[in-house]
């Protein structure tokens, strides 16, 4: 006689609760990644915007004077958009639904705009031409031996990280937590605690009532 033993199969959770748990888990992971990308990207952009993006020389009095232009001299767009992006990254947690979607889109646009501005500035010579004209005292003077560094591309890479943070917020932001409203005051008056008459058997209660300006002999 053959015996068939039923081996219990592992249960796999399914349904709305499992889907909600999976969405919550994915939301927490995406939240951490977005915050990390946004913070690193902003730090990179703000740091590299102060580095030398281009350098060259200008002829002055028969000699050559070296000149340099930082990222801030070339364009202030990446720095400005990064500051706006940081504000948007924080504001994502203060809004809900459509507001969160709009703020997430703003964050992504700030990253894209900062990256585009850095790429354009990588080949810019206007800032150094302006410095050359001031240094030489001749409005027609231009920069010579112009060279560009790799810092604009590093700035663009940092801006791309901000863009990715915005895209994550657009995709998973609806699963992210929002600021709690339990500390918000609705302006309604708080109910006053009912005061009970002091216990005549406890003299310290009578003294406390007198200190508060109350009549300990008056019954509520």
Image: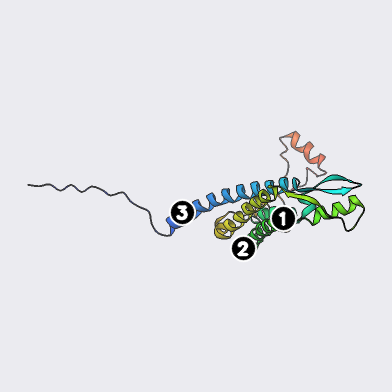
Is label 1 or label 3 in front? 1
Residue 62 in the image: x percent, y percent? 90, 46
Asked whether 181 or 159 is in front, the reply is 159
Q: Which mark is residue 105?
A: none
Image spot of residue 41 (x, y percent): 65, 49
Along the line of sight, the residue nearer the viewer: 194 or 88: 88
Q: Is residue 190 left or right of residue 138?
A: left
Task: Point out the frontmost of discs 2 and 3.
Answer: 2
Q: Are marks 2 and 3 in contact (CB under 8 Å)?
A: no
Answer whether residue 220 is visible to the viewer in this image: no
| Residue matched to label 3 | 22
Give the SS element for disc 3: helix
The earlier-in-sequence mark between 2 and 3 is: 3
State the separation of the CA atoms marked 1 and 3: 46 Å
* Image spot of residue 87 (x, y percent): 70, 54
Neighbor class of circle 3 (other Cα within 10 Å; few <14, some 14-19, many 20+) is few
Q: Quadrant of residue 99?
A: bottom right
Q: Which mark is first along the chain, 2 or 1?
A: 2
Colour scheme of the rendered structure: rainbow
- The Cα–Cα distance between marks 1 and 2, rounded to whole angstroms, is 35 Å
The picture quadrant where one finds residue 210 is top right
Pointer 1: what residue?
Answer: 123
Question: Which residue does the numbered mark 2 point to in the structure image?
Answer: 101
Q: Disc 2 versus disc 3: distance between alpha carbons?
A: 21 Å
Q: Nearer the viewer, residue 213 or 118?
A: 118
Between disc 1 and disc 3, whose residue precedes?
3
């Amino acid at each position: 006689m053959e015996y068939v033993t039923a081996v219990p199969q592992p249960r796999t959770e399914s349904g709305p609760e499992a889907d909600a748990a999976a969405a919550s888990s994915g939301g927490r992971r995406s939240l951490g990644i977005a915050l990390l990308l946004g913070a690193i990207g902003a730090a990179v952009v703000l740091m590299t915007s102060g580095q030398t993006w281009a350098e060259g020389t200008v002829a002055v009095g028969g000699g050559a004077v070296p000149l340099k232009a930082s990222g801030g001299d070339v364009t202030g767009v990446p720095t400005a958009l990064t500051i706006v992006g940081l504000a948007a990254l924080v504001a994502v947690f203060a809004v809900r639904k459509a507001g969160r979607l709009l703020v997430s889109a703003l964050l992504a646009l700030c990253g894209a705009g900062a990256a585009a501005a850095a790429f354009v500035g990588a080949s810019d010579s206007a800032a150094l031409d302006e410095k050359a004209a001031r240094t030489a005292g001749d409005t027609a003077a231009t920069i010579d031996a112009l060279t560009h560094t790799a810092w604009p591309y590093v700035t663009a890479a940092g801006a791309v990280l901000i863009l990715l943070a915005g895209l994550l917020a657009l995709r998973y932001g609806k699963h992210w937590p929002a600021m709690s409203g339990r500390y918000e005051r609705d302006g309604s008056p708080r109910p006053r605690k009912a005061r009970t008459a002091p216990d005549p058997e406890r003299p310290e209660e009578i003294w406390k009532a007198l200190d508060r300006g109350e009549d300990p002999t008056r019954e509520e």
